[in-house]
């Protein structure tokens, strides 16, 4: 069983090596995640919690977008967080914290909580507690947004490209995520499988909402429904 200190040591070294090689600049994955966050409720004034921020590449992009908002970025690696604090010290709306989330707490709630390619690196037995911590800092309108490797893609990598794996890399199938979310008052609102590095879909972006979030189920008028029906019929002809 991998220990917390082993995980910390792995990421202390890994992020330092990547940064020394100039490989921690924004890449297409970061830009896609930012675009999907914006499409799923991220506003200029959002209060954001980022879990698993690493060296802060996405954190910095988010801080630049949040002209009236702020972001708290958390990661397990102490040395990486210190490096991130130094690299992005001029961001006044960005706060970095060290934690593996097992005992993390905050006195406020967040509009957006994001897990950008981190859930697969957290042992499954810790997911229940993680969702408990997330629930404690959410409110009725909070969006939980998760980006993960597509589980089928990660299974392929585990079998054929072990050189791409990190110290922990667990395929997160939808039923696993859905059950943990349900146990803590969340449900999956949407799931988008998309491709970045492979021909087949290699990532998933998942939007979750609080179960007590209220949607306005107002019945559409007859004209609107008729127009929609006509559109569908036209589309079926092609």
Image (cartoon, rainbow, N blue to C red):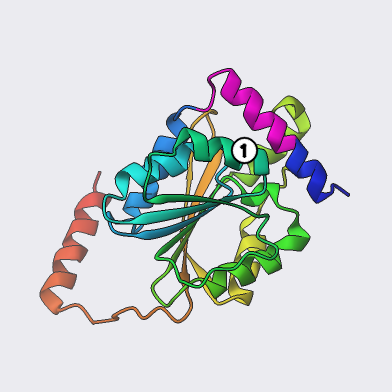
Residue that badge 1 annotates: 80
The residue closer to the viewer here, 232 or 30, is 30
Observer-nearest of 142 and 189: 142
Percent of width and height locating residue 52: 59, 48
Q: For the point 57% across and 25% down, which residue is it? A: 19
Which residue is pictured at 43% across the width and 30% down the height? Answer: 28
Q: Position of residue 31 (x, y in %)?
A: 39, 36
Q: Is residue 48 left or right of residue 199?
A: left
Quadrant into which the C terminus falls: top left
Q: Please determine whether, in this image, residue 1 is positioned above or below residue 112.
A: above
**Is residue 213 rendered to the left or right of residue 2?**
left
* Label 1 environment density (alpha carbons within 10 Å; few <14, some 14–19, many ≥20): many
The stretch drawn in magenta includes residue 16? yes
Residue 75 on image: x %, y %: 61, 48
Kindly indicate the quadrant of the structure image that contains residue 42. bottom left
- Residue occupying the point 77% across, 32% down: 159
Along the line of sight, the residue nearer the viewer: 108 or 141: 108
Q: Give the magenta-colored segment's residue range.
A: 10-24
Does residue 88 appear left or right of residue 216 in this picture? right
Q: Is residue 23 visible?
A: yes
Residue 66 versus residue 20 in the image, above or below: below
| Tag 1 secondary structure | helix
């Amino acid at each position: 069983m991998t220990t917390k200190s082993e995980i910390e040591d792995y990421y202390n070294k890994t992020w330092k090596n990547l940064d020394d090689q100039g490989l921690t600049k924004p890449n297409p994955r970061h830009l896609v995640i930012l675009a999907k966050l914006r499409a799923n409720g991220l506003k200029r004034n959002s209060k954001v919690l980022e879990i698993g921020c690493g060296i802060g590449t996405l954190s910095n992009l988010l801080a630049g977008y949040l002209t009236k908002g702020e972001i708290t970025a958390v990661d397990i690696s102490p040395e990486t967080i210190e490096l991130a604090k130094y690299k992005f010290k001029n961001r006044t709306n960005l706060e970095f914290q060290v934690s593996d989330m097992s005992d993390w707490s905050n006195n406020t709630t967040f509009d957006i909580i994001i897990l950008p390619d981190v859930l697969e690196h957290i042992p499954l037995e810790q997911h229940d507690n993680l969702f408990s911590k997330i629930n404690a800092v959410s409110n009725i309108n909070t969006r939980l947004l998760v980006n993960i490797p597509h589980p089928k893609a990660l299974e392929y990598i585990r079998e054929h490209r072990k050189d791409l794996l990190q110290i922990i890399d667990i395929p997160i199938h939808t039923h696993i995520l859905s059950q943990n979310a349900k146990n803590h008052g969340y449900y999956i609102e949407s799931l988008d499988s998309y491709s970045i590095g492979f021909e087949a879909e290699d990532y998933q972006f998942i939007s979750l909402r609080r179960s007590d979030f209220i949607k306005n189920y107002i019945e559409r008028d007859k004209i609107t429904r008729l127009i929609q029906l006509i559109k569908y019929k036209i589309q079926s002809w092609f």
